[in-house]
Amino acid sequence: GAGVSQSPRYKVAKRGQDVALRCDPISGHVSLFWYQQALGQGPEFLTYFQNEAQLDKSGLPSDRFFAERPEGSVSTLKIQRTQQEDSAVYLCASSLDAGTGHGQYFGPGTRLTVT
Amino acid sequence: KQEVTQIPAALSVPEGENLVLNCSFTDSAIYNLQWFRQDPGKGLTSLLLIQSSQREQTSGRLNASLDKSSGRSTLYIAASQPGDSATYLCAVKFTGGGNKLTFGTGTQLKVEL
């Protein structure tokens, strides 16, 4: 079946621009996560949704970062006034139900470069 | 602080060799542990998921073990092949840490002909 998809795959933004990254989870998966991966590092947690509810946003690095999942399916991660330190790969993962021990399945990521 | 460490950071082996990748975690109160593979410029592919009540999981040439009391997991790869070359990441879901995964920095594996 179809896995997690993300778009765009690559995004170049000028410093100060706003960007929106999209994630389509596996159909039927109620849990959705966003992670940020810097070069040579493991992914770092950003935020987590259970259906449409954002249950944990403790990893969002600043108030410039905002995520939503209004209908409990597709999610968008928005970064306002991008800075160079925002350059990273943004990974989306979904899970059948993370609260019951199911594994997480990742999309290919969006590589964001801020110039 | 709940942390995950992977050693070594990089490993190069000849084709056909059996190898072990190590993962350690600072808090034994875990819900589950997941091993992933990441190819350059790609996302993460889930390899094995071990629940806290399990000691090991196997898939083909891969075997992952879990020892909660010592805070360790190992990924054993049998008869390595050049196609196994990738970065291997260990991720832990800690009890009381929400549902997020905490990742190590990975082991970059190169299997040479």
Image: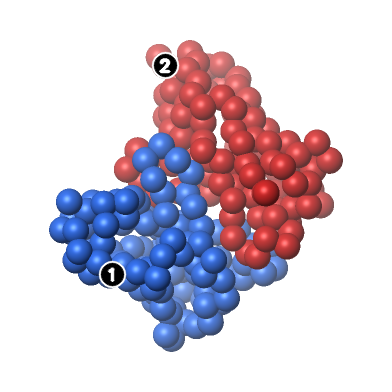
Chain colours: A blue, B red
Query: Chain ID for label 1?
Result: A
Work out whether B57 lies above or below A66. above
* Spatial separation of the CA atoms under disc 2 and disc 1: 44 Å
| Circle 1 SS class | loop
User: Which amino acid lies under the numbered mark 1 shown in the image of this protein?
Assistant: Gln
Query: Chain ID for label 2?
Result: B
Is A28 in front, or is B7?
B7
| Residue at position x 67%, y 49% in the image | B2
**Residue B103 in the image, given as x and y percentages of width and height:** 56, 46
| Residue at position x 42%, y 54% in the image | A36
Which is more foreground, mark 2 or mark 1?
Answer: 1
**Residue A7 in the image, given as x and y percentages of width and height:** 28, 64
Check disc 1: other Cα within 10 Å, few if <14, some if 14-19, many if 20+: some
Check disc 2: other Cα within 10 Å, few if <14, some if 14-19, many if 20+: some
In the picture, which quadrant includes the C terminus of chain B?
top left
| Residue at position x 70%, y 68% in the image | A100
Task: Say the numbered circle drawn on residue B112.
Answer: 2
Q: Quadrant of residue A109?
A: bottom left
| Residue at position x 43%, y 69% in the image | A25
User: Which amino acid lies under the numbered mark 2 shown in the image of this protein?
Assistant: Glu
Q: Are marks 2 and 1 in contact (CB under 8 Å)?
A: no
Work out whether B37 lies above or below A111. above
Q: Quadrant of residue A80?
A: bottom left
Asked if residue A43 can be seen in this view, the reply is yes
Asked if residue A9 can be seen in this view, the reply is no
| Circle 2 SS class | strand
Work out whether A35 lies above or below A68. above
Work out whether B57 lies above or below A10. above
Residue assigned mark 1:
A80
Is A104 in front, or is A114?
A114
Q: Quadrant of residue B104?
A: top right
